[in-house]
């Protein structure tokens, strides 16, 4: 964090230092070892470390066959790259297609900042393709390329039809696991501790639908319709104890060659428990006074107070607390007067001690809440500039603090967008009007 509450001191050699940093945002400073202020006056620098794995090839699928009669078919390439850090540089991708698996002398080599590209420059034959991300433009730093994918382009006679590509198979159900459960499926969560659901990735899946149900009555209590990764965390402080079950379903987006595909939903049952509140022991009953005066008791020796150096160690730092003073306030109504002339809608809350960042999420309220937008910010505020995500109806915005891998409890407010319905006008045919200038 910028406050340098937890520091890693590095050895300096010739005004240089080396360190291995995990992904995230880091602050650094340098100052003389004999600085009486201990570096308080040193101006900090900022470093963003991002893990950028090789791109994941989505289309064409391995071994897919494209047939044509006269004109070369249009091949729609699509891949998935890592999300850039907010405020950081976006990558540039190099798409290569070659007639050999070693990718020597590629027939196609195109740079793009998108994660999709379409071309009809490739003729009949067996083709191999890969995508390499880079930073710094052409001639910049190139990262590891993706494993090569393959596809086939074949020409058929006009009087015969090729069977074409095979019908895509349904997606498999992912294997689920819930961290912290015992062999009986009991999950004990401390206040502010999230339930961490994980699953194995499914081949061909673009994202996953995650739902949480109460076992009694199978009531759905949480829904996230689009989780791009293979993990999900939820703070369950406001959920009562009892039996629940998760469901996770893999989804593949619609393409030009394949419709939207889903797989069977996998389920995982567990029993939520929370630590019992500590209770103080009852004071002992008062002794019955004696019938005659008791003999005086001998003096009780008093042990000397321990020296200051032997004092008990300090308590560990408290966990992250809930953000307070959220604005817009709960059940706020935003109409034309509040939104007219504005270029952004501001969401603010009080800073949480020890928090390095905040996760802000916007949901569309309804029978099942639908996640619309999610961002990570370093300051206790967020400005929504894209008003197209808002429509007439109820919304929920949520924020929770983060510090490294620690995730604090979430707090949320509701608000309503009350805009007048759009009145569509109809043209009136007035015919031809004649007159003088």
Image (cartoon, rainbow, N blue to C red):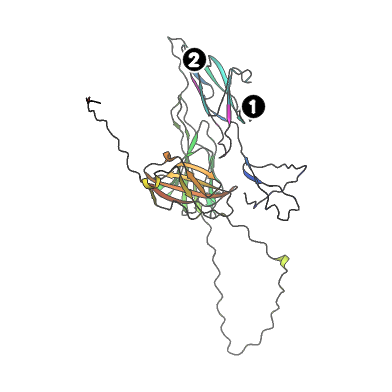
Left or right: 33, with 23 as reference point:
right
Q: Is residue 167 above or below residue 265?
A: above
- Residue drawn where x is 46% and y is 15% of the image: 162
Front in this rendered view, residue 23 or 430:
430
- How far across and down, in percent of the image, does residue 226 sit? 47, 38
Residue at which label 1 appears: 139
Residue 72 image label: 2
Where, by quadrant of the figure, is residue 138 drawn?
top right
Q: Is residue 114 highlighted in magenta?
A: no
- Count residues near mark 2 (Cα–Cα under 10 Å), then give few for <14, some for 14-19, many for 20+: some
The residue lying furthest to the front in this view is 437
Can the viewer see residue 219 in this picture?
Answer: no
The magenta segment: 72-93
Can the viewer see residue 313 in this picture?
Answer: yes
- Label 2 sits on a secondary structure element that is loop
Q: Are marks 2 and 1 in contact (CB under 8 Å)?
A: no
- Count residues near mark 1 (Cα–Cα under 10 Å), then give few for <14, some for 14-19, many for 20+: few
Q: Is residue 82 highlighted in magenta?
A: yes
Left or right: 413, with 404 as reference point:
left
Badge count: 2
- How far across and down, in percent of the image, does residue 342 sit? 43, 44
The residue lying furthest to the right in this view is 14
Left or right: 91, with 257 as reference point:
right
- How far across and down, in percent of the image, does residue 377 sit? 54, 45
Is tag 2's residue or tag 1's residue first in the polypeptide sequence?
Answer: 2
């Amino acid at each position: 964090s910028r406050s340098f509450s937890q520091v890693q001191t590095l050895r300096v050699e010739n005004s240089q230092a080396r360190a291995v940093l995990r992904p995230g945002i880091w602050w650094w400073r340098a100052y003389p070892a004999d600085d009486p202020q201990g570096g308080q006056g040193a101006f900090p620098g900022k470093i963003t470390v991002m893990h950028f794995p090789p791109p994941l090839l989505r289309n064409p699928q391995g071994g897919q066959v494209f047939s044509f009669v006269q004109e070369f078919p249009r091949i729609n390439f699509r891949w998935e790259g890592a999300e850039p850090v907010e405020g950081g540089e976006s990558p540039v991708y190099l798409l290569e297609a070659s007639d050999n698996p070693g990718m020597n002398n590629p027939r196609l080599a195109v740079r793009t900042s998108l994660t999709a590209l379409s071309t009809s420059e490739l003729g009949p034959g067996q083709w191999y393709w890969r995508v390499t991300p880079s930073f710094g433009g052409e001639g910049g730093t190139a990262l590891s390329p993706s494993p090569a994918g393959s596809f086939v382009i074949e020409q058929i006679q006009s009087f015969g039809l090729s069977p074409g590509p095979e019908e895509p198979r349904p997606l498999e159900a992912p294997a689920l696991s819930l961290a912290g459960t015992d062999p009986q499926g009991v999950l004990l969560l401390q206040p502010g501790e999230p339930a961490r659901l994980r699953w194995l990735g499914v081949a061909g899946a673009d994202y996953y639908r995650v739902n949480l149900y109460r076992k009694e009555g199978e009531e759905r209590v949480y829904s996230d319709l689009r989780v791009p990764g293979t993990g999900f965390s939820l703070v369950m402080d406001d959920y009562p104890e009892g039996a629940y079950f998760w469901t996770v379903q893999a989804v593949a987006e619609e393409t030009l060659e394949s419709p939207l595909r889903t797989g069977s939903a996998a389920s995982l049952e567990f029993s939520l428990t929370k630590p019992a509140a500590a209770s103080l022991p009852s004071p002992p009953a008062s002794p019955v006074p004696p019938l005659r005066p008791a003999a005086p008791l001998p003096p009780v020796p008093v042990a000397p107070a321990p020296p200051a150096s032997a004092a008990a160690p300090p308590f560990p730092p408290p966990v992250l607390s809930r953000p307070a003073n959220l604005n817009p306030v709960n059940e706020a109504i935003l109409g034309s007067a509040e939104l007219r002339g504005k270029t952004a809608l501001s969401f603010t809350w009080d800073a949480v001690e020890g928090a390095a960042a905040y996760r802000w999420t916007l949901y569309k309220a309804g029978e099942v809440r639908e996640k619309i937008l999610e961002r990570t910010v370093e300051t206790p505020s967020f400005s929504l500039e894209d008003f197209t995500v808002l429509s007439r109806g109820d919304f929920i915005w949520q924020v929770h603090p983060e510090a490294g891998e620690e995730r604090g409890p979430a707090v949320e407010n509701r608000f309503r967008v009350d805009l007048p319905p759009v009145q569509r006008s109809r043209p009136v045919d007035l015919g031809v009007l004649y007159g003088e200038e």
